[in-house]
Image: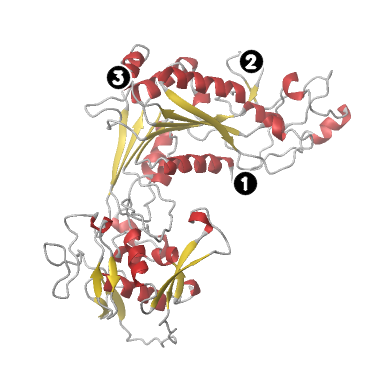
Amino acid sequence: MGDFGNFNHNYALQATMLGQSDTHQAIETIPTEQISEVSNDLRVTFNPPLWLQRRTWVLEVLREVDATSVLDLGCGEGSLLEVLCEPASTVSSYQPSNVKERTIDIHVSHIAGLDVSAEDLQYAVETTRPLSEEETKNLREWDKPRPRWEDMRVDIWKGGLEVLNQDEVGWFGRKEWDAIVSTEVVEHLPEEILDVFFPTVLGVYQPPILLLTTPNYNFNQLFTPPVPPGHRPLRASGYPDPTGKTDRVFRHHDHKREWREEEWKVWCEEGGNEWGYDVEVGGVGNMQEKDPWNREELAGKASMTAIFRRKPGKEVERTKKAMKVVKRGGMKHELMATHYHKSHEMAGKPLSPDMIMDAIRRVMEAGGDLDYLKGDAAVEDVWQQQEVAIACGGNLSFLLRLLEGLSGKGEWELVKELPGEVHVWREKKWYWRIIWKAFVEKAPEEETDNQGEEAWQPNHGWIENEATDEDEDPWPTTYSSWESSEDNTLADGGGWDIKESRGWENELSWTVDESGDWKIS
């Protein structure tokens, strides 16, 4: 299941509305002899591809609701799960500051997928597993995965939607899922399974958020020219409704239904009202081409969407009502794989401020061909350098507070600029730059055969390695945080002990006095 109905390539479906007068009354007709000339020329393409627009919509909603657990019903080959497996760029304990740099991260700790196709699920199992140390070692440096700052679990299940996945914890191994997603799935379900879809998902599983998408039948008219009144429709090369309930021609051979926009709205709102959910319907997908008959407004979006938001209260009543409808028994779901993605050992353990700033200096000095890092760089570009992110324990909030405290008091300046190219993740179209006022670009050094390799270690700075195996990892086997006294104060020139808590920075921040010494405020 999953993303059936994609047509991100040049897809010209020679289907027709079969004379549906309600959608053609306002369309200017053309002479019959011209139909054959244009019928094979209509193309419908999307940029970005339609599947990507649907996925973007899902991710935007998951980000908006801060979902940390996501269940994908009808996950197919696991394309959404694979994206959710990507490490976030920061730890989840992102704290507010006067300096703000938004990220597009979704901090998930548990994801799961369910599908009936064992063949598709093999891909899901493979694409969501963590790479082994040996696999990572053999990758080119720029292909290696980013550091992961939070543990994550992935479960891949095989089975049908009509069967409850219940265990001693709850449903699919959790008491509650923050969000359930089911994209391009409901159009494939047989009638007897569709009848229990809402009772199962909204009545039993009861997620705070449910996200659905399905093809918009109205949009299909853009695949072929309109048929003049009194003329026989063109022969359709789509897929006639297999149920025989309508004379519609569908986009995919396995579709059991394709709704019009008004039908979709009614179906979703009826389900929401019955099971205690507010519903917001919409759509994604406009074709790139201009329709010769100006039917875009009538056609609407290529895919229809729906967001179900659970109303507070009545959880017990929902469950009791649903259990009277949902069938018990059936073939139990099979757990095909469970993956555990472990966080980096430095996650939540920032080094001392001096060591972090030293790491930034090295990144700016070693910019090489990356001119955007040489002495004047966007904070997000500095953060993308793993050495800086690791030195900060993955905590972007801590870095921003540190830079804020240093700005204007010595060799560092933090400035706000409007970039030439605005990215969606930058709040209010602004971003922050860090300027190292003491930066002097060094002349390139001549390489010699006997020149050793330098490697940075968190507690020792740069060290000169003698001839070592080029595959040897320069990082030490274990890392240690910057430790000091038990009462979390600076003493004897030491740093900060944060072993007991990852949220200490909520109340304290670093500043620099006139003499250049660190202090806490």
Q: Secondary structure at mark 3?
A: helix
- Mark 1 — residue? 47
Badge 2 local density, few (<14 within 10 Å), some, or many (20+)? few
Q: Depth check: give the residue in front, 451 or 300.
A: 300
Q: Secondary structure at mark 2?
A: loop
Quick one: label 2 or label 1, which is nearer the N terminus? Answer: 1
Q: CA distance from mark 2 to mark 1?
A: 32 Å
Q: Is residue 47 above or below residue 295?
A: below
Residue 14 seen from this side: no
Circle 3 or circle 2, nearest the eye: 3
Q: Secondary structure at mark 1?
A: loop
- Disc 2 vs disc 1: Cβ atoms closer than 8 Å? no
Tell me which corner region of the image, top left, top right, bottom left or bottom right, holds residue 32.
top right
Q: Residue at x 37, y 67 (%)?
A: 404
The reply, left or right, for residue 403 in relation to residue 503 is right
Q: CA distance from mark 3 to mark 2?
A: 39 Å
Circle 3 or circle 1, nearest the eye: 3
The reply, left or right, for residue 173 in relation to residue 224 is left
Q: How is the image coloured?
A: secondary structure
- Mark 3 — residue? 316
The reply, left or right, for residue 15 in relation to residue 311 is right
- Disc 3 vs disc 1: Cβ atoms closer than 8 Å? no
The label shown at residue 405 is none
Quadrant location, the C terminus: bottom left
- What residue occupies the far left of the structure in this picture? 486
- Mark 2 — residue? 246
Q: Depth check: give the residue in front, 431 or 472.
A: 431
